[in-house]
Amino acid sequence: MNQPLVALIGRPNVGKSTFFNVIAGRRISIVEDIPGVTRDRIYADTLWNGREFTLIDTGGIDTQSEDVLFAQMRRQAEVAIETADLICFFIDARAGLTHQDEEIADILRKSRKPVLLVANKLDYKGLSDALYEGYALGLGTPIGISSTNMLGLGDLLDAIVGSLPPDDETPSDSSGGVINLAIVGRPNVGKSSLTNRLLGEERVMVSDIPGTTRDAVDTRFEHGDGSVYNVIDTAGIRRKRAIEDQSLERYSVLRSIAAIRRCDVAILVIDAMDGVTEQDMRIAGMIQEEGKAAIVAVNKWDALEKETGTLEKYRLDVLDKLKFIAYAPVLFISAKTGQRVPQVWETVSLVYAQAGKRVPTGLLNELVGEAQLNLQPPMEGGRRLKIFYATQQGVFPPTFILFVNDPQLMHFAYSRYLENQLRKAFEFTGTPLRFILRERGKEEQA
């Protein structure tokens, strides 16, 4: 079922993200005493009194600044307003009403969406009179809360649930499981541009300023083939030493790593003009370590000067530098022009299916037996490795248990050989493979 959307709207630094984090139960939006910190929409599914809904946290609407980022934040908030079923308009009760609050109220009235007026930062009784100032906005009775001290939150949640459309008015979603797709990479390689191109609409801010996307932004998307995706556009991951004293970026990096951990498929976006950098290799390593299906998207391919054989030469260079995810398909795209972007969806579908593939036990043991006949297992100290039996334990990634005489006799090279034999027989495009070695009892080995 499609859950109703509740957008948190207001000028910068009125406490929207603090409320969002308290309700979501985890630190999702970045909270700092700096106007404009939360710049993209953030989503979180919420349950209150048996009713499910999705909160959308937005960057503050600054109606006066001409800064390009504040302008884009306004656009993002406008998109949230357009898509929301209900709007919670936050004002700062301590600061009192401002001209910007009045301008935002005008915007909300024109949207013709139901609005709850929330007077935040009512931290003590002496501020109760400030609550009534909100009546001047003409948006109904203000609901007083303190997100920081968790006062009045139940009343607000009751009001939200009471203002949502009935369940039978919410369109049903008959699709099956949702595929989590993370767009990751260094800052300014075109992750947000690719996300927007994939979704076919302006959902994530795009700017030429590195680090524009500070939060990992989730967007649910239904593809034409009926597949449902949760597309996660992440903050750029910078080298650790470059962010030690920058708390905002530190939060962003942690969130990006967390996005890799919770995704099913990760798209590593590389800048064609820069080639594979050391940081690209580190991010690829994170994807491999987490056992995620992977695609390498070489973006800005349209901007690179090419000659005969450039593409294949570039592909071989990518695979050489990213040896540990050499199983990942490499796509050459332009998020700006849309060049080969449709191939991204096709490839995501392919690698997702490969990551969930199971090999029948009989075929698996037949392959392992032939592999040992074609290339004898390694020997050490007069003892040779013996693989008695193999079975697949799980998927995402495909994981195989090998029962052996002594796990210490397995060399990395032979493990890689077995992996290559599996890939040759069953493909496993775009997904890592895992082997678990278990020693078989001596009585069983006799």
Image: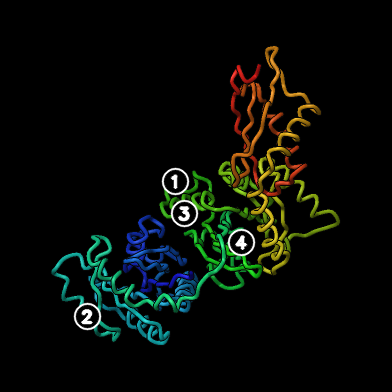
- In the image, residue 183 above or below residue 136: above
Q: Nearer the viewer, residue 398 or 210?
A: 398
Crowd tier of the residue under label 1, counting other residues whose Cα lies within 10 Å: few below 14, some 14–19, many 20 or above: few
Question: Type of residue at label 4?
Answer: Gly
- In the image, residue 9 above or below residue 311: below
For the residues labelled 1 and 4, the Cα–Cα distance comes to: 24 Å
Crowd tier of the residue under label 2, counting other residues whose Cα lies within 10 Å: few below 14, some 14–19, many 20 or above: some
Question: Type of residue at label 3?
Answer: Ser
Crowd tier of the residue under label 4, counting other residues whose Cα lies within 10 Å: few below 14, some 14–19, many 20 or above: many
Residue placed under numbered mark 4 in the picture: 190
Question: Type of residue at label 2?
Answer: Glu
Q: Nearer the viewer, mark 1 or mark 4?
A: 4
User: Mark number for residue 244?
Assistant: 1
Q: Earlier in the sequence, mark 2 or mark 4?
A: 2
Residue placed under numbered mark 2 in the picture: 133
Question: Under tag 1, what secondary structure?
Answer: loop
Q: Is residue 162 left or right of residue 128?
A: right
For the residues labelled 1 and 3, the Cα–Cα distance comes to: 12 Å
User: Mark number for residue 252?
Assistant: 3
Question: Under tag 2, what secondary structure?
Answer: helix
Q: Earlier in the sequence, mark 4 or mark 3?
A: 4
Q: Nearer the viewer, mark 1 or mark 3?
A: 3
| Percent of width and height locating residue 175 | 57, 66
Q: Residue at x 80, y 58 (%)?
A: 306
Q: Earlier in the sequence, mark 1 or mark 3?
A: 1
Q: Nearer the viewer, mark 1 or mark 2?
A: 2
Crowd tier of the residue under label 3, counting other residues whose Cα lies within 10 Å: few below 14, some 14–19, many 20 or above: many
Quarter of the image where one finds residue 84: bottom left
